[in-house]
Image (cartoon, rainbow, N blue to C red):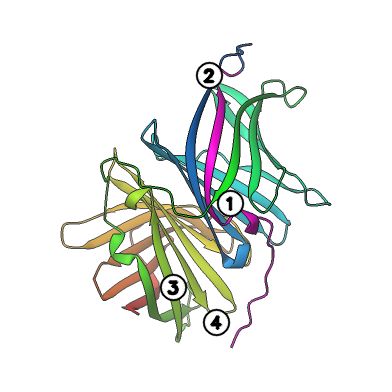
Amino acid sequence: MTTWTKVTGDFDFFSGHFDVRHRRLKHPLTDSSEWEEFDGTTTAHTYFDGQISIDETHFPQQGTYGLSLRLFDPVAKQWSIWWVSSTSMKLYPPVHGSWSADGTTCTLIGDDEHDGRPVLCRFVWSDITETTAHWEQAYSGDGGASWETNWTMDFTRRDTPPPALDVPKVTDEFDFLVGSWSFHNRRRRPVLGEPHEWYEHDATLQATTYFDGAVSFDEGWFPSEGFRGATFRLYDPVSREWSIYWINSKNGRLEPPVVGKWNADGTGVFEGPDTWDGQPIDVRFHWTAGTDKAAWEQAFSTDQGKTWTTNWFMEHTRI
């Protein structure tokens, strides 16, 4: 049996429920000094024993959600953080960085844009205690020579979950996956090329949703393979498509997404470009939904989708 080694606990302090006081600059990078203040809540969880941190923020006055997806790269030993707003349902460009040597602050910077203008975006975490924390965001329009803080959040731990937002449910398409599952894997080795063989192993996963179903996340344990896997799914209410991202605990990166939608018969097909061993490929996921049984399979194509080689089957049974 594999014994999982804890890689990081950097964001363990943030697990739980918080009340949040927001202070936000209304018009960044315009020499404006007009701020707005409002209250909200946040609930945060860690996965991969601390290597993934996800929080869902409620903005009750606006009737919207926000979500932060944090991944730790154990090789580079740095964090990457993506932001998702329920108003756009898109992943914003990530910021990257790490905690200071004394563990008191975390600074992350990345490329972004504001009102069509390229900017640098900076997140800073500080003032961490058992019950409080401080976060702020700043933009730089001059390559980092100067910074303007435009959003601060002050967190105070609360004992109970925050109330749900009273907003319409956008989708329930991956709600069937919520809960605990065991699943049997049948995998092709090698995934491409001949000759090949098939091998089998068992695993388990735990799935949940955020944004009342519009974000789906699962964490899988593959003890015989020596890694954990996670899937982050994001729904676009305009196109009615899902973007599905895979995360491997060995590298802590968000892999390129496959994109697609569910059919009326309870099956979903999701495809996207990727590379395998330096070779351009297309990847296809096929889901069959079910209450107590579900199935998933993966296939690769090296000829722009003309032919496909299926290389991984999963048969899920609800625990």
Q: Is residue 258 left or right of residue 46?
A: left
Q: What is the three-letter code of the residue carrying label 3?
A: Leu
> Badge 1 is on which residue?
70
Q: Residue 166: image x %, image y %?
A: 30, 41
Earlier along the polypeptide chain: callout 4 or callout 3?
Answer: 3
* Quarter occupied by the N terminus: bottom right
**Vertical comparison of 314 with 27: above or below:** below
Earlier along the polypeptide chain: callout 2 or callout 4?
Answer: 2
Label 4 to label 3: alpha-carbon separation: 11 Å
Earlier along the polypeptide chain: callout 3 or callout 1?
Answer: 1
> Badge 3 is on which residue?
205
Earlier along the polypeptide chain: callout 1 or callout 4?
Answer: 1
* Quarter occupied by the C terminus: bottom left
**Vertical comparison of 221 with 154: above or below:** below
Label 3 to label 2: alpha-carbon separation: 42 Å
Q: What is the three-letter code of the residue carrying label 1?
A: Arg
Q: Nearer the viewer, residue 224 or 172?
A: 172
> Badge 4 is on which residue?
223
Q: Nearer the viewer, mark 2 or mark 4?
A: 2
Q: Nearer the viewer, residue 299 or 106?
A: 106
Q: Residue 249: image x %, image y %?
A: 59, 66
The boundaries of the magenta stretch are 1-28
| Image-quadrant location for residue 310 | bottom left
Q: Report the residue at 60% width, 53% height from top.
A: 14
Q: Is residue 222 left or right of residue 30?
A: left
SS for callout 4 = loop
